[in-house]
Image (cartoon, rainbow, N blue to C red):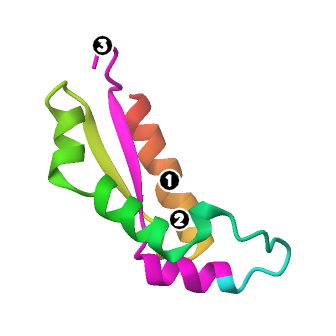
Amino acid sequence: LEHAPDALILAHIPPTQAMARLGERTDKQDNAQFEQYYFLEQAHKTFHSDIYQSFFTVHGTTIHTLDTTVSVEDMKATATTLLTSCME
């Protein structure tokens, strides 16, 4: 990895909860691949795996996890704090 990022932020939400949120949407119903359970499950497993994360950490990247299971307001507040700390 020639230009490793200083920080990597991974959103965390179980695929079942992501699907429940997608099911509540009425403004967009295009069945995009990245909105399918299998894709979400595989992405979650990959991004949160030790192998994937070590690809970055071995190059000095700090990995942060953003809990996206909380309310939008709480998520925004946490994301703002996290981004601010990454920029320091």
Residue position marked by numbered label 1 in the rendering: 79
Q: Secondary structure at mark 3?
A: loop
In the image: residue 20, left or right of residue 51: right
- Asked where in the image residue 2 lies, by quadrant, the reply is top left
In the image: residue 86, left or right of residue 33: left
- Asked where in the image residue 30 lies, by quadrant, the reply is bottom right
User: Callout 2 environment at 10 Å: few (<14), some (14 to 19), or many (20+)?
Assistant: some
User: Callout 1 environment at 10 Å: few (<14), some (14 to 19), or many (20+)?
Assistant: some
Residue position marked by numbered label 2 in the rendering: 75
Residue position marked by numbered label 3 in the rendering: 2
Task: Please state which of residues 69 and 79 is positioned toward the viewer in this rendering.
Answer: 69
What is the distance, in whole Å, between disc 1 and disc 3 at their CAs?
Answer: 27 Å
Q: Secondary structure at mark 2?
A: helix
Residue 3 shown in magenta:
yes
Residue range (magenta): 1-22
Which quadrant, please, contains the C terminus? top left
Q: Are marks 1 and 2 in contact (CB under 8 Å)?
A: yes
For residue 2, above or below residue 4: above
